[in-house]
Image (tube, rainbow, N blue to C red):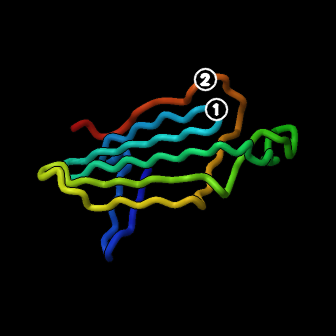
Amino acid sequence: MIGIHHRGKFYEFAPWNAEVSWDIQPWGDWRMEAKNAQYTVIVTGITHLPGTPLRAPTAKGLVFVCRDTMQGKVNVEMYDRRSDRSILKATSNLCGLETGGQQWNGSWSDRCGWSL
């Protein structure tokens, strides 16, 4: 799900009202995109930092299975699909980025939701 509150309006992109896709690398690169009938939103996050290992609850107790940073770079872009007009472009260098829950060697990519 992607939720954006901008200029007094809430924009919700979730499987029940949008097509949501993501491509998350094992570390350093995150990309999500969502489209509904009216808007497209693209959220990207990157970091070149190694991240901090974190413990998370598992069946074996707290185990180092997550990694995060609070110094990632995020870009958010939202467009009106009908006019191709930009609604929002925002960037921050203080983004929280995380992977975890299990180890994986490749990207985590999928899509779900409402079909356009």
* Residue located 62% across and 50% down the image: 97
Q: Secondary structure at mark 1?
A: loop
| Disc 2 residue type (three-letter) | Gly
Q: Quadrant of the C terminus?
A: top left
Q: Secondary structure at mark 2?
A: loop
* Residue located 69% across and 40% down the image: 100
Q: Tell me residue 7's x, y (percent).
A: 32, 74
State the residue position of label 2.
106
Using a 10 Å C-alpha cutoff, classify the residue at mark 2 as few (fewer than 14 neighbours), some (14 to 19) or many (20 or more): few
In the picture provided, is 19 more to the left or to the right than 46?
left
Proximity of marks 1 and 2: CB atoms separated by less than 8 Å:
yes
| Disc 1 residue type (three-letter) | Pro
* Residue located 73% across and 46% down the image: 51
Q: Tell me residue 53's x, y (percent).
A: 80, 45
Q: Residue furthest left?
A: 83
Q: Name the residue nearer the viewer: 55 or 47.
A: 47
Indicate which disc residue 51 carries: none
Q: Name the residue nearer the viewer: 73 or 8.
A: 73
Q: Residue furthest top?
A: 105
Q: Tell me residue 33's x, y (percent).
A: 38, 43
In the picture provided, is 81 more to the left or to the right than 112?
left
Upstream in the sequence, badge 1 or badge 2? 1
Q: Which corner quadrant of the image does residue 71 belong to?
A: bottom right
Distance (Cα) linking label 1 and label 2: 6 Å
Indicate which disc residue 26 carries: 1
Using a 10 Å C-alpha cutoff, classify the residue at mark 1 as few (fewer than 14 neighbours), some (14 to 19) or many (20 or more): some
* Residue located 46% across and 59% down the image: 91
